[in-house]
Amino acid sequence: MFSAKRLTRLRAVLERRVESGAVPGVLAVLARRGEVHIEAVGRLAFESTSPEMAPDTIVRLASMSKPIVAACAMTLIEDCTLRLDDPIDDLVPELANMRVLADPAGPLEDTVAAERPISVRDVLAFTLGTGMPPEEAPIAAALDTLRGPSLDEWIAGLGKLPLVHQPGERWMYDTGSDVTGLLIQRATGKSFGTALRERILEPLGMKDTGFSVEAKDFGRFATAYDHEDGPDGAVVQDVPETGRWSTPAVFEGGSGGLVSTAEDYLAFASAMLAGGTYQGTQVLSRAAVTLMTSDQLTPAQRAVSGFWPGYFASTSWGLGTGIVVDRTQLGPSAGSYGWNGFYGTTWYNDPAEELTGILIQQRAHAGDARLAFLRDFWTSVYQSLT
């Protein structure tokens, strides 16, 4: 279980985060062997009249969307609508017969033919050949211009650009989750959001998770802040009433478009930890969860570019989720899985400890200060276990 005395250290870490002025509020949820512990500090916005942080506070998940999207794709693999090693050409002809950069850092015109098609497995394992390259590469600027009004328009633009690497050659972050959303949309014949709701969100009772927030819920939707302060303090990046999530989304982005609550994410995390079952409902098979949360990368694929240095020293990637392969900190055990979000959110399940940890805040990450806080969070979680 948890040591009540040692949990005071977790509370202190969260309080220091708020008192520093970094965020107006922060929320932690820990679950282990039927026990759930919640710590909420501060408010939804820096305004003193804003509501206090709570388990039903709505936040932007950013990249914590990725595991949910991958789980939805796994339901299509389970019912044989998709097959992991089939090419995606029939469903995504825009990415068929691709050209590949001869040099990942070279000019866009210097290309060679793709050696093989992109598979469903490539998309989920982020080895499809495109993603986030180093900022100085010419392909990076071209990719940055792509996000279009809809998934169909976006993929049309992506298909006109060369891949950065041969399919299956390297892991590249991010883009695979948006392609996953498109695959789900075309394989089901429904909008991505509808398929996600029917296959994952509704079975798990995740009523506050989606691609937008209704006006009636703006009062519990936290404000998001930029990573830098302006002359008058924290810079607002997104507000509930008029921001990106205040109207129905046209581009339903699997890489980072979902909003949710700690309560909803705990339902998803609990189902994953229980082998795909939540409150008697089998959402995924145990085999599907095991596959998602197993290391899918070779050492050559982990020779990563365009991501933070040292990431693959102790971590790898499954199907839509990060995997801890070596415990190097006072934190998640080897075999743990989960992911982080751009606004400072984080989630990991630790099967060895039967533990789920979720951290909620809404400030864009940048630099070592954010990473130091996440390390302190996980340290305070693990030192509290009995």
Image (spheres, grey):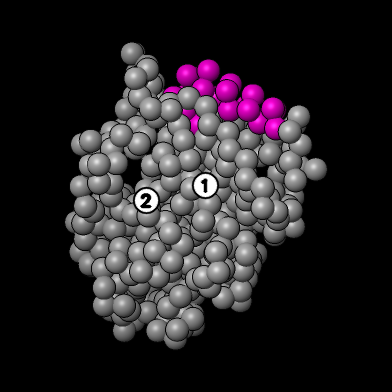
Q: Which residue is mark 1?
A: 340
What residue type is disc 1 on? Asn
The reply to whether the magenta stretch includes residue 10 is yes
The residue closer to the viewer here, 167 or 353, is: 353
Query: Residue 252, position in %: x, y?
Result: 29, 58
Q: What's the residue at 53%, 52% (across, down)?
A: 266
The reply to whether the magenta stretch includes residue 119 is no
Which element is circle 1 on? Answer: strand
Q: Which residue is mark 2?
A: 208
Position of the C terminus, as image quadrant, is top right
Query: Residue 229, position in %: x, y?
Result: 39, 21
* Horizontal relation, residue 327 to residue 270: left or right: right
On residue 123, the disc is none
Q: Are marks 1 and 2 in contact (CB under 8 Å)?
A: no
Q: Residue farthest to the front? A: 280
Q: Tell me if residue 227 comes above or below residue 143 in the rendering.
A: above
Magenta: main secondary structure equals helix
What residue type is disc 2 on? Asp
Query: Residue 353, position in %: x, y?
Result: 74, 53
Which element is circle 2 on? Answer: loop
Q: How many marks?
A: 2
Quadrant in the rendering for residue 235? top left
In front: label 1 or label 2: 2
Query: Residue 320, position in %: x, y?
Result: 50, 63
Quadrant in the rendering for residue 104? bottom left
Range of magenta residues: 7-26
